[in-house]
């Protein structure tokens, strides 16, 4: 919005001698790093009032882990306000409105739909859970699993369809390519080309059906994976901050023709605005960590975790980095895989377990590590995953 206002009032600003100063808002790198600071500041400013409001509404968590020992270990968290994801979502949306091109960018329109839709689903689920006792015996405790999954899959399919249309309408085959590890999207001979039009013959360009299926699984899957990770103070917020910064770098590469051609990655015109979205997400998560670090003053709940996971995956699908997202979000993938393995093994063996408790962060906690040790070490692993993802893009 600020960049559009700069264009609108360019002559007036020039007469005042302010144009050279304000014109920095035309630079996407400046807006992206500004988005980190703006979102971080908004969370710090509005965090305490929102937490106070949540306490007044008695929107406090009473965690149930279906494990007597873990319930005992976590009983100190009872009563801590949840639904704090509204702080994160609000900061991201406000920052996007200020610093993104809300009028012309289809990517920003889709990103807005993703975060608002999933935040709404998460808020309904959180509210039903937290007010069940207030509404009387027999009241629903959250959305049913199939209801949440239906909303997630519906959104993911819809967004994936429009991402496909965006790439096909622009006649940009790279925006529809399946970007495999170590595979060159372009031939080295095109590094100095003015336009990147010819893909490497080995690159597989997805049709509508395959594109939508992959995008749907990616967005819905990562939304649930981050939701499963949100089980310890600062765990989801910290790992999302790291993943968002890595995604910010990838969005920049995808939107810059010279960088994309040099690294032989898909060039996605218009994806520069997504760099600002990733910056806003990183700043909001970092600000939330101020209140969510151990001992947490607030939890993000499904409101935050579902929307953050979906938005991260949306960015990856838009810049054709779904496979690299598995490395960037390695912690989230580990958490989801541990739940799938535990449930499957439990059913197949009639009650035996692989882990002490799943998701896997509880396995380590019950093994003797303190909550702070588990979270800090998961942050370290998330940094390593992020560095591996960035290093791998040069190996083509």
Image: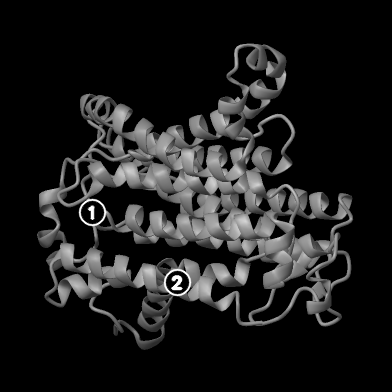
Helix, strand or loop under label 2: helix
Residue 46 position by quadrant: top left
**Residue 52 location in percent, x, y?**
22, 26
Give the position of the N terminus as an image quadrant: top right
- Viewer-proximal residue, 363 or 105? 105
232 horizontally vs 69: left or right: right
Q: Earlier in the sequence, mark 1 or mark 2?
A: 1
**Residue 135 location in percent, x, y?**
30, 30
Q: Residues within 10 Å of mark 2 (few under 14, many from 20)?
A: some
Q: Residues within 10 Å of mark 1 (few under 14, many from 20)?
A: many
User: 376 above or below 245?
Assistant: below
Residue that appears at 19% across and 41% down: 297
- Viewer-proximal residue, 150 or 234? 234
Q: What residue is shown with label 1? A: 233
- Viewer-proximal residue, 318 or 125? 318
Residue 9 position by quadrant: top right
Q: What residue is shown with label 2? A: 387
385 horizontally vs 271: left or right: left
**Residue 177 location in percent, x, y?**
77, 68
Helix, strand or loop under label 1: loop
Residue that appears at 25% across and 70% down: 377
247 horizontally vs 228: left or right: right
Residue that appears at 89% across and 55% down: 171
């Amino acid at each position: 919005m600020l960049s559009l206002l700069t264009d609108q009032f360019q002559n007036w600003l020039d007469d005042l001698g302010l144009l050279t100063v304000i014109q920095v808002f035309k630079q996407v790198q400046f807006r992206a790093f500004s988005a980190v600071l703006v979102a971080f500041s908004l969370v710090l400013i509005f965090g305490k009032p929102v937490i106070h409001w949540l306490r007044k509404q008695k929107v406090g968590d009473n965690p149930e882990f279906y494990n007597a020992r873990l319930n005992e270990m976590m009983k100190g968290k009872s009563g801590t306000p949840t639904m704090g994801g509204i702080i994160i979502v609000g900061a991201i949306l406000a920052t996007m409105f200020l610093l993104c091109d809300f009028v012309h960018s289809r990517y920003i329109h889709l990103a807005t739909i993703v975060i608002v839709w999933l935040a709404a689903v998460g808020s309904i689920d959180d509210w039903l859970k937290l007010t069940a006792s207030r509404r009387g015996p027999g009241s629903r405790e959250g959305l049913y699993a199939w209801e949440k999954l239906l909303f997630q899959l519906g959104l993911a399919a819809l967004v994936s369809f429009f991402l496909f249309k965006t790439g096909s309408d622009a006649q940009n085959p790279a925006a529809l390519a399946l970007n495999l590890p170590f595979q060159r999207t372009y031939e080295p001979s095109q590094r100095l080309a003015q336009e990147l039009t010819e893909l490497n013959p080995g690159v597989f360009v997805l049709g509508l059906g395959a594109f939508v299926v992959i995008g749907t699984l990616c967005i819905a899957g990562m939304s649930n994976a981050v939701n499963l990770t949100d089980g310890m103070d600062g765990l989801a917020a910290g790992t999302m901050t790291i993943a968002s910064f890595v995604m910010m770098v990838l969005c920049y590469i995808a939107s810059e023709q010279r960088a994309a051609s040099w690294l032989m990655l898909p060039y996605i015109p218009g994806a520069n605005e997504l760099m600002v979205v990733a910056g806003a997400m990183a700043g909001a998560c970092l600000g939330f960590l101020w209140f969510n670090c151990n001992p947490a003053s607030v939890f993000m709940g499904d409101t935050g975790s579902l929307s953050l996971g979906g938005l991260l995956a949306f960015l990856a699908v838009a810049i054709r980095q779904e496979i690299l997202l598995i490395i960037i979000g390695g912690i989230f993938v580990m958490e989801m895989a541990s739940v799938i393995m535990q449930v499957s093994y439990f059913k197949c063996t009639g009650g035996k377990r692989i882990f002490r408790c799943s998701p896997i962060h509880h396995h380590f906690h019950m093994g003797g590590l303190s909550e702070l040790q588990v979270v800090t070490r998961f942050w370290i692993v998330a940094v390593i995953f992020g560095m591996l993802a960035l290093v791998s893009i040069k190996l083509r």
